[in-house]
Image: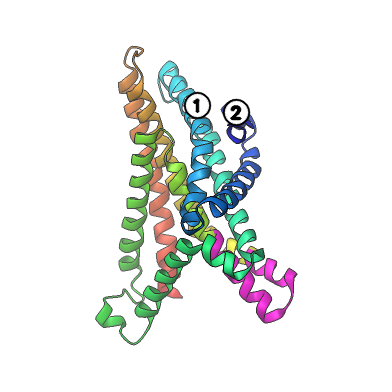
Amino acid sequence: MVLESIVSGKELMKHPLVMLFIAILFSSCGMWLAFFTFPNSSSILGIAFVTIALVPVMHNIFVKEEAIEAETGGWTPNFIERHFTVVRIYAWFFIGLIVSYAFWYAVLPIEMRETVFSEQEKVLGGIEELRDKMTGNFTIDRGACGRNAQCWFDIVFFNNAFVMLLSVVFSFIYGAGAVFLIGWNASVIGVKIGQEIVLSIAVSGDLSQGIMVGALNMIGLLPHGIPEALGYFFGAIAGGMIGVAVSKKSYLPHELRTISKDAIITLLIALAFLFVGGWIEAILIATA
């Protein structure tokens, strides 16, 4: 009750940057609360606590978005600008969680770290194992794409499109349920950066060197990470608008048609971002 009342949807729409600090605060509180209550499930429960706190706020934002869509008839000169306000909110939430999880992973004792970030480390371990199989002696047998950028694009794009679909479904069913999915992805990236920081500090013994490595890892994600994240955000917006519209009991004339049209356009924008991000990532993998 206290955390979710710290900031309102209206304030976030005016000052999206506030979400960066809200994400750091909420994720830190959620992580510690989860650890002290259900330590064996804290890696997932910490994200769930963040979601519980933010869904009411994000739902109010989507209610305002849907009302504006219905009243203005969809495409207006500020259509993209209005949606980018929500995208910026999601983006600062995403970045805030990455920073928070990277920081806590780097500073927590090993025993606590293994408990709090257990699921994220399992995911990252699976990715490394798959990468070893694809780049090892069994590349051909494993069906990896080698240096075929088109093959890598098919894998990356359809995987990202599936994640975006989940983002749409989560937002449609839970109003702003994509907060959990986006938060989970951010936590995995944050833990990965935290691992690099810990490794760098262990090798060099220099804290500033470790932080620099973490910053470089974040920069390395930018070429394909930005368009892919934007695709997820726009997908979440489309699902949220549809969910709010369907849950209403009274409608303006042609409101559902307008919202449906705008949701489809928003989804197409999301797919365009995923297409660009997929090609960038495919080329980077194929030429690595």
> In this picture, which residue range is highlighted in magenta?
190-214
Picture layout, residue 84 above or below residue 108: above
The stretch drawn in magenta includes residue 212: yes
Q: Position of residue 92 (x, y in %)?
A: 59, 45
Side of 193 relative to 153 (left or right): right
Which residue is more in the foreground, 254 or 245? 245
SS for dot 2: loop
User: Label 2: which residue?
Assistant: 8
Q: Position of residue 39 (x, y in %)?
A: 51, 57
Q: Earlier in the sequence, mark 1 or mark 2?
A: 2
Camera sees residue 276 = yes
**In percent of the image, x 36 and y 76: which residue is there?**
147
Q: Position of residue 234 (x, y in %)?
A: 43, 40
Pointer 1 and pointer 2: residues touching (CB < 8 Å)? yes
Q: Residue furthest bottom?
A: 137
Q: Amino acid at mark 1?
A: Asn
Q: Which color scheme is applied? A: rainbow
User: Label 1: which residue?
Assistant: 60
Q: Amino acid at mark 2?
A: Ser
Q: Position of residue 5 (x, y in %)?
A: 61, 30
